[in-house]
Image (tube, helix red, strand yellow):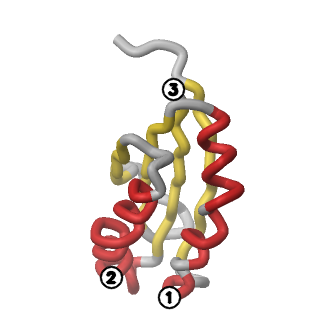
Amino acid sequence: MYIYNVTINIDESIHDAWLEWMRNEHIPAMLDTGKFSKALMTRVQVQEEMGGLTYSVQYRTDSKATLDKYYAEDAQTLRGQSKPFEGKFVAFRTELEVVAEF
C-alpha cells in the first residue's frame, strides 16, 4: 500500500473557494482516475511563518506501479486544473510506503 501525500499552504484570501474546489471537484477527480481507493484531507495544526492555512491530502493507492501510472497518465492534467489559484498556494508532494497498519 502506498500513500500519495500532497501538502498545500493556501493564501487566506482564496481559502474558501479553494476548499470548496478541493472537496467538490479536485479530490473527486483524483478518485475518478481509478488509481486511488481513498482520500483523507486534514488541516495541519501548526501556524506557518509564511501565513496561510496548511492542509494535507493523502490518497491511498495499491502500489508504486499504480502511482507511477497516475504520474504518467493523469498528474499533468489534474495539476493544471489548479490554475485559478496560481500564485496563491505552495504545494509539495511526498510518497509514503505503508509498512504496517494496526
Percent across and percent down for residue 8 are 51, 61
Q: At 37% from the left edge and 47% from the top edge, which residue is drawn?
A: 39
Q: Decide: marks 3, 1 in contact (CB < 8 A)? A: no
Quarter of the image for residue 68 reads: top right
Q: Amino acid at mark 1?
A: Pro
Q: At 54% from the left edge and 15% from the top edge, which residue is drawn?
A: 99
Which residue is disc 2 drawn over?
Answer: 17
* Mark sitting on residue 84: 1
Comes first in the chain, label 3 or label 2? 3
Comes first in the chain, label 1 or label 2? 2
Quarter of the image for residue 49 reads: bottom right
Asked which secondary structure carries label 2, the reply is helix
- As measured in the structure, the alpha-carbon distance from the residue carrying label 3 to the one carrying label 2 is 32 Å
Name the side, left or right, on which 19 lies relative to 72: left
- As measured in the structure, the alpha-carbon distance from the residue carrying label 1 to the one carrying label 2 is 10 Å
Which residue is disc 3 drawn over?
Answer: 1
Asked which secondary structure carries label 1, the reply is helix
Residue 46 shows in this picture:
yes
Comes first in the chain, label 3 or label 1? 3
Percent across and percent down for residue 26 are 41, 68
Residue 47 shows in this picture:
no
Mark 3 or 1: in front is 3
Q: At 47% from the left edge and 71% from the top edge, which residue is drawn?
A: 10
Q: Residues within 10 Å of mark 2 (few under 14, many from 20)?
A: few
Q: Decide: marks 1, 2 in contact (CB < 8 A)? A: yes
Q: At 53% from the left edge and 46% from the top edge, which residue is drawn?
A: 5
